[in-house]
Image (spheres, rainbow, N blue to C red):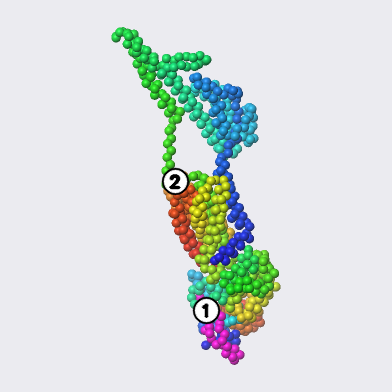
Amino acid sequence: MQSATRSEPLRGATPTPNAQRPTPPLTSPPTLAGTTVLTEPTLRVDDIGMRYGDIVALRDVSFTAKPGERVALIGPNGAGKTTLLSILAGIQRPSSGRVSLDREHVGWVPQHAAVYRKLSVAENLRLFARLEKVPDVEETVQRMLAQTRLAGRADDEVGRLSGGNRQRVNIAVGLVADPRMLLLDEPSTALDPRHRERVWEFIGERAEAGTTILFSTHNVGEAERYADRLLVLADAELLFDGTPGEFVALAGDVHDVEAAFVRFLHARGH
Amino acid sequence: MRWLLLKDLQILRRSPLLVALLIIYPVLVALLIGYALSRGPSKPKVAILNEVPKGQGSFDLGGTKINGDQYASRFFDAVDPVPVKNRAQALERVRSGQALAALIIPADIVSKLATGGLERPTLDVIYNAENPLKRQFVESTIQFQLAKANQALSGKFREVASQYIDLLLKGGTFDAFGANFRILGLQNAKAILEGVAASLPRGSPERKALDQVIHFAGLAIDNLDLSNAALSSISSPLNVKTTTIGAGKKQPLDSFAVAVAVTISMMFVCVLLAAGMLALEREENAFTRLARGLVSRLGLLTEKISLAALCAAAVGLAMLAGIGAFVTVDWGRFPLWLVAVVFAGAGFAALGVAIGGLAREVRAASLFAFLLSLPVAVLALVPSGATNPTLYDIIRVVSAVFPFRPALDAMDAALSGGGIGLPLLHLVILVLAFGAIARLSLRRFA
């Protein structure tokens, strides 16, 4: 039985096609520093595939994610990152395979702010809290306003906020139901460095609180800085699943993930 | 779903342009239509130059006094007369636009009319051709009034001619040039001649000549007896019998115009609103969030249809109330109005969500909705007989595919009576059909 802890080693020095690796069961007893602990994966993906007619968007993708883990999904354009996240979010159904995930406890943050510009920050949070059937709507709204540091802008229409603040509202809406897993599609795109930093800080706080974070990004540097694990997707397949350090080591003679990523893709004809 | 409905109402409240479109536009349309219906066509300004000297408007025809001023006043009632002093002034009024036309009544009109039709007077009418619509309006008004005057005068002439014929036939007294004449009459003349002929011996040449005169008198009496009927048929050449066909319903023009106004306004508001609000969910990227299970796709469509139908019902009722200030509407039929307005709103809203789902963008959806609604409304209003039967059948089929025609029928039935069941059933079928199209379109909405 395979372990699902962060200390689980990569399978050999070369990345193994994910389809060849068995994924652990949701109740596997992993070992951590010699101690057996019960850490149930928040997410388990088994051989999912997606086709649009003759076009294959995803092929036999399998992986798991644990509570509090920050997983970055990277890959070239058209690799299938958004399709994979859409399937995990429940927006699309896969053509094949299985996703084990408690959908009621998944927060979804699309790439572009999915909030109503004509409503205020508080009204957006209130609306989605009601739709998520949160028990105490007002308490949740106040908590999210405090966490996003937008309490002072609570009554401002979202359309009047800066891109960064709008993205914070977008993330906050994804978190109103206090999900165990948060899916983010390129959360820092189009943000200036200051706002980007704030967003990652906010996401980091959620991970420390035990929320599993799975995000896609084009910014490989961000993936290196903010992720515990990398999933490299290219040509509809998952080509690498491991830590940033393992990814750099795999590439050899490079010192960062970005250089490793370029070399990795180049070696596969990209 | 109620939270989404509340959210959409909040968005509408914060969209002043949209609210202006939803409220001010239909109210303005209602006011304009109500004003137009209640006021009727205005009288055209016509410059009048009457060259007949004052007090000489009457003439004598065979001992009967005919008052020309009486006929002129009927004409002046139909126009807004602008008195002028001479022909140049009349031309100037028309040229400057102060009058749409000028009518010049010649000085010899009385003397020519007094000939009893032997001489025909000529009226001068001058139009301003600057605006063809105005010209057509004033031209038809003047022509109509002149035709009426001609008819009235010819009737009077016929009456006088009949009196003459009666006098010739039966005899009597006749006043002319201040003197009183006695007319023997053909019937009396014939009786006298027959008496004289009977006193003459048979075979006498005088009796033979007298018999010829008696025979002529008989023929003249018989034929002049028929002349009254002949004169009547000339003054009224066609006898018109009016027959109304239909399903036993005489449709008041006002209520049909109200139904058209309300249905058109509701259609635009409802289709645009439903299409725009659904497309907005995608433009705001919120659809992906909602479609994750927060709201079912069918629930989302139901919410948009409900929202648009609710707004359309409010708009429709506001319009009816607005038009009711100008035109008599039967408030006792209010429950039927409500039913018609709600079903029509649902039909238009279903079309709107189908458009919104297919177009996927607010601007494209609005344009699509507008471009589709306008010809659909126009086609549905094409009357039978206005085009060839095959084309009309095609128009009927096209109209039946969209909710405007059944919505108009339902509104008309609610306002003025008639069967409302079939139009409502038609609308229900269209709601289901367009709802299905919208549901399918959401597959590629994310």
Task: Name which quarter of the figure residue B103 lies in.
Answer: top right
Subunit that carries the residue with mark 1 = A
Q: In this view, does B201 lie above or below B313?
A: above
Counting labels gives 2
Q: Is mark 2 on a helix, strand or loop?
A: loop
Amino acid, disc 1: Ser
Q: Where is residue B37 in the image (x, y as percent from the top left)?
A: 55, 44
Q: Is residue A22 left or right of residue B200?
A: right
Q: Residue beneath label 1, please?
A: A100
Would you call the spot at circle 2 few (<14 residues within 10 Å), some (14-19), or many (20 or more)?
Answer: few
Amino acid, disc 2: Lys
Q: Residue beneath label 2, please?
A: B249
Distance from Cα at disc 1 to Cα at disc 2? 66 Å
Subunit that carries the residue with mark 2 = B
Q: Residue at x 50, y 47 (%)?
A: B256
Which quarter shows the C terminus of chain A?
bottom right
Q: Which residue is drawn at 56% across and 67% down?
A: B287
Q: Position of residue B187 (x, y in %)?
A: 38, 17
Q: In this view, does B212 lie above or below A71?
A: above
* Observer-nearest of B336 and B66: B336
* Observer-nearest of B243 and B369: B243
Q: Which residue is drawn at 60% across and 28% down?
A: B49
Q: Where is residue B229 in the image (x, y as percent from the top left)?
A: 41, 26
